[in-house]
Image (spheres, rainbow, N blue to C red):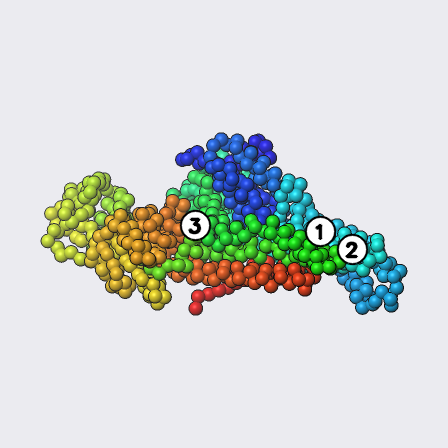
């Protein structure tokens, strides 16, 4: 791939000058392949590379010249793999072609296997004396003529992969498999020429048959595991309609740019982030927010790529498109989480790095050992071939990625986004939960609490003034009035409130000390005061309501034996009221963000593993100080949020779901490691001592991979009890 090839695909971070390139990897078969590519690239200074085994997407980050990307791609290509700019459409087509070819290979090897059984049964149940040397040789030659074309064709997926890496001085899991098949076939052909008895044409082709079945089922299982990421990638492909003056044009989504007017018909997915400039419709925002109830969108509403326009055509002025949209940010965060360096990922990578030298030394040692024991070289070679097949690390390589992909996909479907690869691993360890109040236990949206105490005239007047302010309490007043607003000239008095003139009277809306009754009693409510001329000022009180399921979630967490703490910068009466309502005994009011972080550090010093749940922007120090963190967040700030896990919507239940998925994922990963370990503990010694054949080894190896993926996929069906 030349400089021209990649120049238009390199992304540059304007803040630090770093570069990023997304590439599609062809020819990668297993975790050891991914490890080889990552190791080669990460050995370069100021380079960070990571492969997502689910999407076969390589992400390379580096500093320096943009053109350095050419050298990095060349170095990776030298390992025997092919790299192209990532395109989910091309990837899907390539996957479909590969699946079709695998099915053809399975059909050929299966057909030949079935037909060879007639010859094999006759040879198995007859002696040389009863059959005769001539008849046996004739049957061996017929088997050779039938088998050799099938082995050559059906083994192509393995031979090509092995040759591509071997010619560059490297190896992968397909090398020992190809070597095993070719050795068994070559030995059989040699024995046929010399009228020998060690002929295993049937075993060779049957071995390929079962290996291919295993690879096909493994590919299908991985395809299901990566469905969520593939769906997101697919949304960034295709075409969109834009309006240029009075003319309409169709452009590829990747060519959309800020400032363009995007036309979105009813039923279409929105292709880019932007603001509605024309039209009114209902929007399905479940992909972004997790909420299934449609949102009403009108002129000025901000919409994001991936949302679906339900009711009527709308026009959107694009603010961010393609790789810079929120959808692209979410996809990047998902992939970062899936390929993050959690403890178990590092362990699997380390084991994969040992695979190549260990398996070949083990097979060679087995062959030599049996020769020393006086066994015929043909039988010793067959046993060594079995060792080559049975030691494939596929199950181990899939143990962690399969669970990680499924866990992040499940959480994403429920409105949660993992931003850290080891977040679930850390979440499974927590014993203490620290809550912020405003925007976390509460909705963070104050609402008028005493509308019945306010006359319609006063509410209309206050709402007409409040509509000129962006203050949250002003917004609550304006939202409480559904009628027509008065036309007023409103001025803002910084730090105090709003002032206007109405019917020759000065009207003020703001703080108690500025326009309210200083002698009035105080309580836990937030307040604004409306003063009309010399009349007695009227008090507007506000309450920030708890999230609908906050009490239920807190009770559930307490039932798990977790220590609960409430830390808030709000006034003591308000915090006390919320704590009492939820049953949280340990609470602190009037605390600063720095003090919050200090309290979390203190809990950590006591040996606690703290989950901090707070506003992603305001509580950044506390979120960073915690063992793991979660945050409710709007779509706008989702990528700036400091939390490890971000959740959407008005409910707190995602906390319970994330905790359950974390615990379940930990169990499944451990189970997968146990299954992989048990497979090797049982299969390898049996292969070395010659108690299993290459055919049984192939079935065992394929079954172990499928078993690991199937066990991981149980996560989709698991429910908390």
* Depth order, front residue of 359/111: 359
Q: CA distance from mark 3 to mark 2?
A: 53 Å
* Residue contact between numbered discs 3 and 1, judged by CB atoms under 8 Å: no
Query: For residue 659, what is the image quadrant?
Result: bottom left
- Find the distance from the CA under tag 1 to the CA under tag 2: 17 Å
Of the pair 573 and 598, the residue shown nearer to us: 598
Q: Earlier in the sequence, mark 3 or mark 1?
A: 1
Circle 3 sits in a helix, a strand or a loop, which is it? loop
Q: Which residue is mark 3?
A: 420
Q: How many other residues sit within 10 Å of disc 2, few (<14), some (14-19) or many (≥20)? A: many
Decide which of tag 3 and tag 2 comes sooner along the chain: 2
Determine whether the residue tagged by mark 1 lies in a helix, strand or loop.
Answer: loop
Q: For numbered disc 2, what is the local secondary structure?
A: helix
Residue 115 lies, in percent from the top left, at 79, 61
Which image quarter is the C terminus in? bottom left
- Position of 398 with respect to 662 (left or right) is right
In the displayed structure, does residue 176 sit left or right of residue 563? right
Name the residue located 59 percent from the left edge and 60 percent from the top edge: 680
User: Which numbered disc flags the more N-terminal residue, 1 or 2?
Assistant: 1
The residue pinned by badge 2 equals 188
The mark total stands at 3
Give me the residue at 85% from left, 65% from top.
128
- Residue at coordinates 68% horizontally, 50% vertically from top-left? 158
Q: Percent x, y for residue 670?
A: 49, 60
Residue at x 38%, y 55% (from the top left corner): 649
Q: Which residue is mark 1?
A: 155
Nearer mark to the viewer, of 3 and 1: 1
């Amino acid at each position: 791939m030349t400089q021209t090839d990649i120049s238009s695909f390199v992304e540059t971070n304007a803040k630090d000058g770093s570069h990023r390139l997304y590439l599609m990897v062809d020819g990668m078969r297993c975790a050891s392949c991914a490890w080889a590519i990552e190791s080669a690239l990460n050995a370069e200074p100021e380079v960070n590379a990571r492969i997502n085994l689910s999407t076969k997407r390589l992400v390379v980050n580096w500093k320096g010249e943009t053109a350095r990307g050419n050298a990095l791609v060349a170095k990776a290509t030298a390992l025997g793999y092919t790299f192209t700019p990532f395109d989910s459409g091309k990837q899907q087509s390539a996957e479909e072609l590969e699946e079709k070819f695998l099915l053809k290979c399975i059909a050929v090897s299966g057909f030949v296997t079935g037909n060879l059984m007639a010859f094999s049964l006759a040879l198995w149940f007859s002696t040389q004396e009863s059959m005769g040397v001539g008849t046996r040789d004739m049957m061996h030659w017929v088997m050779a003529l039938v088998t050799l074309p099938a082995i050559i064709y059906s083994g192509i997926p393995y031979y090509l992969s092995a040759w591509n890496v071997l010619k560059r001085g490297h190896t992968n899991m397909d090398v020992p498999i190809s070597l095993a098949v070719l050795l068994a076939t070559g030995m059989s052909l040699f024995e046929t020429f010399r009228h020998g008895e060690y002929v295993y044409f049937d075993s060779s082709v049957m071995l390929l048959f079962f290996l291919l079945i295993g690879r096909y089922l493994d590919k299908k299982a991985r395809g299901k595991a990566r469905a969520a990421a593939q769906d997101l990638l697919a949304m960034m492909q295709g075409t969109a309609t834009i309006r240029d003056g009075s003319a309409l044009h169709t452009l590829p989504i990747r060519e959309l740019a800020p400032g363009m007017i995007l036309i979105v018909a009813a039923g279409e997915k929105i292709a880019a982030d932007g603001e509605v400039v024309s039209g009114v419709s209902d929007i399905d925002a479940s992909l972004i927010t997790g909420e299934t109830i449609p949102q009403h969108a009108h002129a000025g509403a901000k919409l994001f790529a991936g949302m679906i326009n339900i009711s009527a055509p709308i026009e959107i002025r694009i603010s961010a498109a393609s790789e810079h949209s929120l959808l692209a940010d979410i996809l990047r965060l998902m992939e970062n989480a899936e390929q993050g360096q959690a403890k178990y990922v590092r362990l699997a990578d380390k084991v994969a790095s040992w695979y190549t030298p260990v398996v070949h030394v083990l097979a060679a040692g087995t062959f030599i050992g049996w020769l020393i024991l006086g066994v015929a070289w043909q039988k010793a070679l067959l046993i060594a071939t079995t060792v080559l097949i049975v030691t494939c690390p596929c199950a181990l390589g899939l143990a962690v990625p399969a669970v990680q992909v499924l866990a992040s996909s499940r959480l994403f479907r429920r409105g949660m986004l993992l931003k850290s690869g080891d977040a679930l691993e850390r979440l499974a360890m927590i014993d203490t939960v620290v809550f912020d109040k405003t925007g976390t236990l509460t909705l963070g949206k104050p609402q008028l609490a005493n509308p019945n105490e306010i006359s319609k005239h006063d509410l209309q007047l206050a709402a007409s003034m409040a509509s000129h302010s962006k203050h949250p309490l002003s917004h609550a007043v304006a939202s409480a009035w559904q009628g027509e607003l008065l036309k007023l000239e409103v001025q803002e008095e910084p730090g105090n409130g709003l002032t206007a003139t109405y019917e020759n009277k000065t009207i003020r809306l703001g703080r108690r000390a500025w326009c309210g009754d200083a002698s009035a009693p105080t309580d836990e409510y937030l307040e604004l005061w409306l003063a009309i001329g010399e009349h007695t000022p009227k008090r507007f009180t506000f309450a920030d309501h708890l999230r609908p399921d906050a009490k239920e979630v807190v009770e559930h967490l307490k039932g798990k034996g977790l220590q609960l703490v409430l830390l808030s910068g709000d006034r003591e009466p308000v915090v006390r009221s919320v704590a009492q309502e939820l049953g949280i005994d340990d609470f602190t009011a009037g605390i600063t963000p720095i003090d919050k972080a200090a309290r979390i550090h203190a809990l950590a010093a006591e040996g606690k593993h703290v989950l901090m749940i707070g506003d992603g922007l305001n509580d950044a120090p506390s979120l960073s100080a915690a063992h793991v963190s979660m945050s409710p967040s709007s779509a706008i700030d989702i990528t700036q949020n400091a939390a490890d896990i971000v959740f959407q919507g008005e409910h707190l239940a995602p906390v319970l779901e994330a905790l359950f998925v974390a615990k379940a994922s930990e169990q499944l990963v451990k189970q997968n490691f146990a299954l992989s370990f048990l497979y090797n503990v049982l299969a390898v010694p049996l292969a070395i001592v010659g108690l299993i054949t290459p055919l049984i080894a192939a079935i065992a190896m394929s079954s172990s991979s499928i078993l690991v993926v199937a066990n991981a996929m149980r996560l989709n069906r698991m429910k908390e009890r």
